[in-house]
């Protein structure tokens, strides 16, 4: 596994001077910055700009408890459309983070239906680090095939120039690593990971369509989880947040590898002006109607989820200490 080598220098193209870079998630924030994302420090943590100009807190598994005024100040000063963060005290949607924190991980830790798939994958594929050239050239094809299966498209993973920038950013961030399942020189699946502050975060996982029958993802997930469980410097593995849109089979896949959902309330707060315009029954009803007409449109599904989350958060009553 990758050695712990924190880096705290933020790229100049982020457009924001980070006053206290020695915060959890600093290495991941640097990675986002090198990819052209905006990095902001507020409420005692770092935030990165996500899709549709939302700010998302880092690290993903760390719950926050800011005051409503702090969030409003962040929205007004950053110009973000909204913010999303996990919390144990705010109201919002039920959510969480997939984590594994155990030791002695082996096939018995895996669901019985996954064990033969892991064994088959292990017989065919060798799991090792992915070199930069392999990731840049072979990884792009895996990205495109995975996005077709999942029904969405992200130009950072599908356009050659943007993908090349992504790979270069990895080279300049020692916390970020790539591991792949290889059949000879053929890359069949890969993971992008971030090792930081005692956690191994699995950020992305892509695979080749024609090789799925041989289970490269299963071999890769097992190898990464087992290696992390044997590393005494790691507290655990984070396999990402519960997604805001439905991705068929993903939840069950992670649970069957022994991961558990660490419960977190998913808090979504819109910018005050957008909240006034969009956070109402009329707009939510219109989006629901469009979703009924176009049930497989993931953009509409995301919009419906964001509006529902914003509604749940805004309807939360304030406690006596002024927090939600």
Image (cartoon, rainbow, N blue to C red):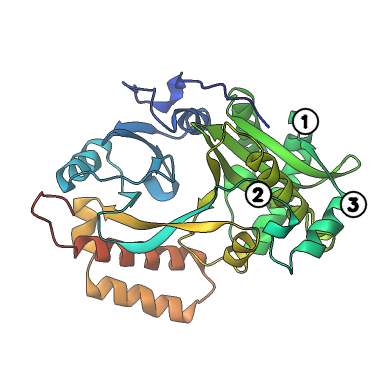
Q: Nearer the viewer, mark 2 or mark 3?
A: 3
Q: Nearer the viewer, residue 110 or 278?
A: 110
Q: Where is residue 127 shown, x and y percent of the image?
A: 80, 42
- Sequence-first tag of 2 and 3: 3
Identify whether 312 is placed above or below 54. below
- Sequence-first tag of 2 and 1: 1
Identify whether 84 is placed above or below 133. below
Q: Nearer the viewer, residue 267 or 106?
A: 106
Q: Where is residue 186 shown, x and y percent of the image?
A: 87, 44
Label 3 sits on residue:
124
Q: Residue at x 51, y 65 (%)?
A: 298
Q: Is residue 50 visible?
A: yes
Tell me the CA gap for discs 1 and 3: 22 Å
The disc label shown at residue 205, or none? 2
| Quadrant the N terminus occupies | top right
Left or right, 284 with reference to 182: left
Left or right, 54 with reference to 135: left
Tell me the CA gap for discs 2 and 3: 19 Å
| Element carrying mark 2 | strand
Q: Where is residue 112 shown, x and y percent of the image?
A: 73, 68
| Element carrying mark 3 | helix
Label 1 sits on residue:
133
- Sequence-first tag of 1 and 3: 3
Left or right, 133 with reference to 183: left
Q: Where is residue 309 shown, x and y percent of the image?
A: 32, 63
């Amino acid at each position: 596994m990758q050695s712990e080598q924190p880096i705290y220098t933020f790229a100049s193209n982020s457009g924001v001077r980070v006053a206290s870079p020695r915060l959890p998630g600093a290495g991941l924030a640097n990675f986002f910055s090198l990819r052209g994302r905006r990095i902001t420090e507020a409420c005692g943590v770092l935030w990165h700009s996500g899709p549709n100009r939302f700010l998302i807190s880092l690290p993903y598994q760390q719950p926050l408890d800011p005051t409503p005024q702090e969030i409003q100040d962040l929205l007004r000063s950053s110009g973000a459309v909204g913010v999303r963060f996990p919390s144990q005290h705010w109201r919002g949607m039920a959510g969480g983070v997939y984590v594994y924190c155990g030791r002695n991980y082996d096939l018995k830790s895996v669901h019985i239906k996954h064990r033969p798939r892991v064994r088959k994958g292990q017989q065919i594929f060798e799991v090792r680090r992915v070199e930069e050239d392999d990731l840049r050239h072979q990884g792009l094809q895996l990205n495109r095939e995975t996005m077709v299966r999942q029904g969405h498209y992200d130009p950072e993973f599908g356009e050659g120039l943007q993908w090349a920038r992504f790979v270069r950013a990895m080279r300049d961030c020692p916390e970020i690593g790539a591991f792949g399942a290889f059949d000879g020189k053929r890359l069949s699946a890969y993971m992008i990971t971030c090792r930081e502050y005692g956690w191994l975060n699995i950020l992305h996982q892509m695979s080749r369509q024609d090789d799925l029958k041989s289970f490269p993802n299963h071999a890769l997930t097992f190898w990464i989880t087992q290696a992390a469980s044997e590393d005494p410097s790691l507290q655990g593995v984070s396999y990402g947040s519960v997604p805001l849109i439905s991705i068929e089979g993903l939840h069950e896949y992670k649970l069957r590898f022994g991961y558990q959902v660490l419960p977190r309330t998913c808090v979504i707060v819109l910018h005050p002006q957008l909240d006034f315009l969009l956070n109402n029954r009329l707009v939510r009803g219109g989006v629901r109607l469009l979703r009924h007409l176009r049930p497989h449109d993931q953009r509409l599904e995301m919009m419906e989820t964001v509006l529902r989350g914003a509604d749940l958060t805004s309807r939360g009553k304030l406690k006596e200490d002024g927090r939600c």
